Image (cartoon, rainbow, N blue to C red):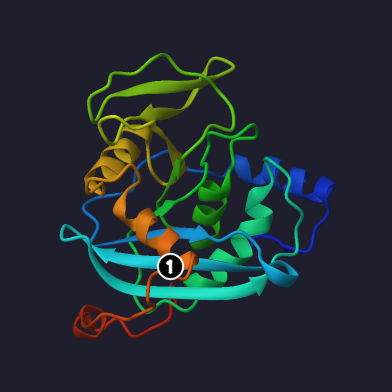
């Protein structure tokens, strides 16, 4: 994976890094039909500031769990809205380094370009991993949208200062929408499509649901035989 900058930075340096990297985010889709889709999430810090970063790999179209990796490390950056990627990315990347299977697409529990400086966690990770990423958050960070329909698949554009930065998407009847945005190497219609493709009766897509369980210690880490059968024994992005 790319080493775009150090994570040992202060707030002013983090803001400068975001402004610099935002221009490098690709909004051109490079997603075809993925064979493996990843989901990433982290838990809230517990004792001594230790949190868990988790990544799960699912096969497509079966959405069968292929691999799970978790990392427990200390969180070193303070909680500052808009700068969460500096707090969470190191844990997610450390978990990704342990993967044997290369994901073709990564769903991230967080924002992509639906961010005041257009580079949330999904975009930041996409640049480091040089892989298509989609932001799928449970709440808005910025922007507004019109009322969307009640039916599954209904969506409304999320707009900030006249710019479309994402979409509020209804993934399940009777639930609040999720907020989908471009992470990296994907366009918005493609992002919406794959979030819906990965939903299995829950509000959040299956890769993120399982990543959340893994980060909370409620999904047993395992490496499915599919990974070995496919011959994916190397490190991620090696």
75 sits to left or right of 150: right
Instruction: Find residue 7 and report its horizontal and vertical position in percent.
Output: 72, 62
Q: In this view, does 29 lie above or below 150?
A: below
In the rendered image of this protein, does residue 170 appear above or below residue 65?
above
Q: In which quarter of the image is the C terminus?
A: bottom left
Using the rendered image of the protein, determine whether residue 189 is visible from the camera's viewpoint: yes
Viewer-side residue, 8 vs 47? 47
In which image quadrant can residue 171 be found? top left
Secondary element at tag 1 = helix
The spot of residue 168 in percent (x, y) is 40, 28
Residue 96 in the figure: left or right of residue 51: left
The residue lying at 72 percent from left, 67 percent from top is 49
Residue 222 is situated, as x and y percent measured from the top left of the image, at 34, 80
Q: Please give the residue where the numbered disc 1 appears in the rendered image.
A: 214
**213 horizontally vs 161: left or right:** left
Residue 81, relative to residue 102: is it above or below?
Answer: above
The x, y position of residue 69, in whole percent, is 44, 75
* Residue name at image x 53 percent, y 56 percent: 125
Q: Which residue is drawn at 49% across and 54% down?
A: 126
Task: Look at 65% across and 49% down and name the residue there.
Answer: 84
Check the image and report above or below for 112 versus 76.
Answer: above
């Amino acid at each position: 994976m790319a080493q775009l900058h150090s994570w040992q930075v202060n707030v002013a340096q983090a803001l400068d890094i975001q402004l610099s990297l935002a221009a490098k985010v690709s909004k051109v889709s490079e997603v075809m039909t993925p064979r493996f889709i990843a989901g990433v999430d982290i838990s809230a810090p517990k004792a001594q500031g230790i949190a868990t970063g988790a990544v799960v790999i699912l096969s497509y179209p079966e959405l069968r769990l292929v691999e799970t990796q978790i990392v427990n490390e200390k969180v070193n950056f303070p909680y500052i809205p808009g700068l969460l990627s500096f707090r969470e990315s190191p844990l997610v990347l450390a978990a990704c380094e342990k993967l044997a299977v290369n994901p073709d697409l990564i769903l991230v529990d967080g924002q992509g370009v639906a961010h005041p400086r257009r580079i949330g966690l999904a975009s930041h990770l996409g640049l480091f991993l040089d892989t298509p990423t989609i932001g799928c958050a449970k709440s808005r960070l910025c922007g507004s949208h019109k009322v969307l329909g009640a039916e599954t698949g209904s969506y409304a554009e999320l707009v900030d200062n006249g710019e479309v930065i994402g979409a509020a998407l209804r993934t399940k009847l009777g639930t609040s929408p999720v907020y989908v945005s471009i992470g990296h190497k994907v366009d918005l219609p493609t992002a919406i499509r794959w979030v819906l493709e990965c939903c299995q009766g829950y509000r959040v897509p299956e890769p993120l649901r399982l990543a959340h369980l893994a980060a909370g210690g409620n999904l047993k880490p395992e490496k499915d035989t599919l990974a070995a059968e496919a011959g994916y024994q190397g490190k991620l992005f090696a």
